[in-house]
Amino acid sequence: MSIDQDDVNQVRVITPALPRGLSASEEETAVRSLLDQQLAALPPVAVRWYYTPMMLPFSAHVPAECIVYDCMDELSAFKNPPPGLLDRERELLAAADVVFTGGSSLYEAKKDRHDNVHAFPSSIDVAHFESARKGVIEPSDQADIAGPKLGFCGVVDERMDIDLLAALADARDDWSIVIIGPVVKIDPASLPKRDNLHFLGARDYADLPAYMSGWSAALMPFALNEATRFISPTKTPEYLAAGLPVISTRIVDVARHYGALEAVQIADTAEQFVQACERAIAKHNDISWRAAADEQLARGSWASTALSMAALIAVERATHSNIEPIVSPTRWPAPQSHHDVMVVGAGFAGAVMAERLADAGFKVLVVDRRPHIAGNAYDRRDAAGLLIHQYGPHIFHTNSDDVFAYLSRFTAWRPYEHRVLADVSGKLVPMPINRTTLNILYDAGLASEDDVEAFLADRAEPITSIRSSADVVISRVGRELYETFFRGYTRKQWGLDPSELDKSVTARVPTRASIDDRYFTDTHQAMPAEGYTRMFEKMLDHPNIELLLGVDFSQVRSGYPHDHLVFTGPIDEYFGYRLGRLPYRSLNFRHETLDCEWLQPVAVVNYPDEQVPFTRVTEYKHLTGDSSPVTSITYEYPAAEGDPYYPIPREENQALFKRYEALAIAEENVTFVGRLATYRYYNMDQVVGQALATARRLIPRLQVAGIEPSVGTAAAAAA
Ligand code: FAD
Ligand code: UDP
């Protein structure tokens, strides 16, 4: 078995390697068990996606929230279809929640066989093929072929009308015909041989525009037979994007979708095909047809196809999952529907803004590129049934009665006071440093707060101007304790020495003379009783709020008109990094379930030793109150690349942020809020407080600007 991992796109291609000589059923059993082995190490499967029913027998047992049949061809019409294909397709149609067809004719063939079929005619990467219009340098194996050149790219198989190709070559020996693509299922010896007919073989997708740049027109010499009755060739829009007029035989979907374009000619006979090529070559330099073609291409972008498919899948997942749906079918917005406000991000900042605005009567669309709500606070049950925090431990604490009262509308609380131990050479001691920590480490016998102050005063180094995270600690506890608890941890966590970080970072963890070993001393300390995600569901469960999850803002910005935008993502990303990148620190999380009841005595153990690659280990049952004979934990490995989790507090970063902030202030009808959009190392409660204040200011501004709430009145907001 080989595994091809694409970490950027989170794609893993697993190719089974089987011994020779297995019977069909032995093969099926072997693949099934290899698949099970692979899946055992992965999170539960959300979607089973089938390009062909032949994959069903070894995967039908895998539970999934949604089964997609992505039907690309009428496979049974192919030459030598595998045995049992039609039976398997029947089974797949019975099991599938949603069926996508790669074109309109296929849609018509399938629409009466399933009640949730949707046509998706070819989408293409226009920018890729468009490069052919700019006169790229032709590849050497084509450059020497005399022009004018007529080209085809695609698989050469029984769908190709090879007699037509021969007739074309014979009719005009002053033209060259270039065929790019592998020859499959037919005998290469059966292909016509002519001096002006060049079969170049398969070429890389990346190189296709360069080949196309040398052509005068593009060909679709398909035979009209069973195998081509349902095709919707992607090469039609690819050719058009490359700036080439197209000559095709009468393929139903080509004639139907593209036949009206000046650039596309449909020919019924070989003679007509030749004449159409003549016309196309004569008009090669007349590009007046392109505007109409481009308009049609813009409607078939990958982004809009992906969005529509994501919507259909999300609805099915929500309907089928055991978890109460985050996205209900009725709440997926219709494309192009108008909203008063679009909110980018469904974390604390976005959810609070959405809830406040919806409550004031505004119609709100919340978009998040993650497939879930709650942002970094997202929690979920893992395979062992334990509630875990997907993006590291989130402990709620605040001194703000307002923030606590506001959130209490959406959740009950489980009282919880956070305690952290630090692993110092295998010894677990309380962190933040307090009297107990010192007594354990130094056997110091410190009996009072005064004793501790005197002990620390002996070690502390006087620093007149406290600027950095190193200064804060060294001036309070001295260099040794600083090195034990702060230097290594901070260097790992931030990739910087504490001397290079703003003092506010380590000041979050103040040393105490008392024996109070709580991590926080805030007046409110508690965990949402049913978890953060459930709390967010309640916040967003409002008739004025619709959700688009799993889609990036850039994909939907223009597709969903809105009067105002609330942006909670990274501010530099919003402005296309035009002033340079703001640095963020990232983390990788390793989630594990251990076969023991408890791993550690408290929820979080910190590992300040720089040699240990992770910073801390969290054991969730302490936080959630779950009980189980097993226990789920998370290791945190700091990283330079990845999701932007932490703004990095440094003077120079703040200076760059200020320049972005100036752009933000000038940006009409956009509000920036949250940890990433205001580049502040904020805790959850601070983000909630910031969002509440921002909403209080924004609502009257929207009203003054004449954005009338779509639903209800604004009276509620004023209350
Ligand atoms: P986020 O939660 O980051 O939400 C922003 C959302 O916007 C994301 O879901 C993102 O996918 C989405 N988004 C961004 N760009 C786009 C785009 N272009 N298109 C669509 N969607 C987009 N705070 C505490 O109070 N206590 C803790 O114990 C605590 N622990 C933490 C532990 C870790 C490991 C981390 C990283 C943070 C912790 N925090 C804690 C801080 C807390 O996570 C944040 O304060 C809070 O989540 C910030 O909320 P937000 O809405 O501003 O940002
Ligand atoms: N810190 C440290 N050692 C520790 C705990 C914290 O050096 O054992 C420093 C480190 O720089 C960290 C900062 O103090 O990033 C703030 O810690 P906190 O626990 O508040 O960070 P969080 O992960 O909650 O943002």
Image (cartoon, grey):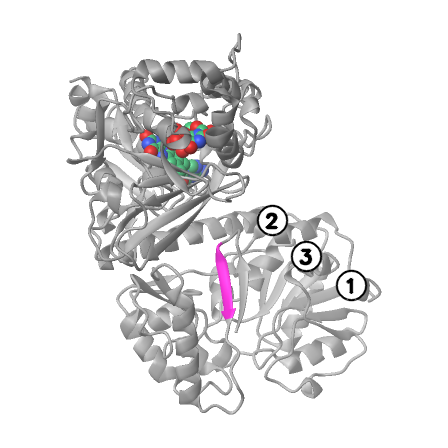
Q: Nearer the viewer, residue 148 or 577?
A: 577
Q: In this rendering, does residue 641 appear at all?
A: yes
Stretch of the chain drawn in magenta = 10-14
Q: Which residue is mark 2?
A: 127
User: Which label is found at residue 262?
Assistant: none
Label 2 C-beta lies within 8 Å of the nearest ligand 1 atom: no
Amino acid type at mark 3: Pro
User: Label 1, label 3: how many angstroms apart (C-alpha)?
Assistant: 17 Å
Q: Quadrant of the C terminus?
A: top left
Amino acid type at mark 1: Pro
Q: Residues within 10 Å of mark 2 (few under 14, many from 20)?
A: few
Mark 2 and mark 1 residues within 8 Å of each other at the beta carbon: no
Amino acid type at mark 2: Ala
- Is the residue 697 above or below the residue 396 in the image? above
Instruction: Please name which of the two marks, 1 or 3, marks the residue nearer to the observer.
Output: 3
The quadrant holding residue 578 is top right
Q: Which residue is mark 3?
A: 209
Q: Residues within 10 Å of mark 3 (few under 14, many from 20)?
A: many
Q: Residue at x 54, y 88 (%)?
A: 20
Q: Position of residue 553 (x, y in %)?
A: 43, 39
* Element on which disc 1 rests: loop
Q: Which residue is mark 1?
A: 148
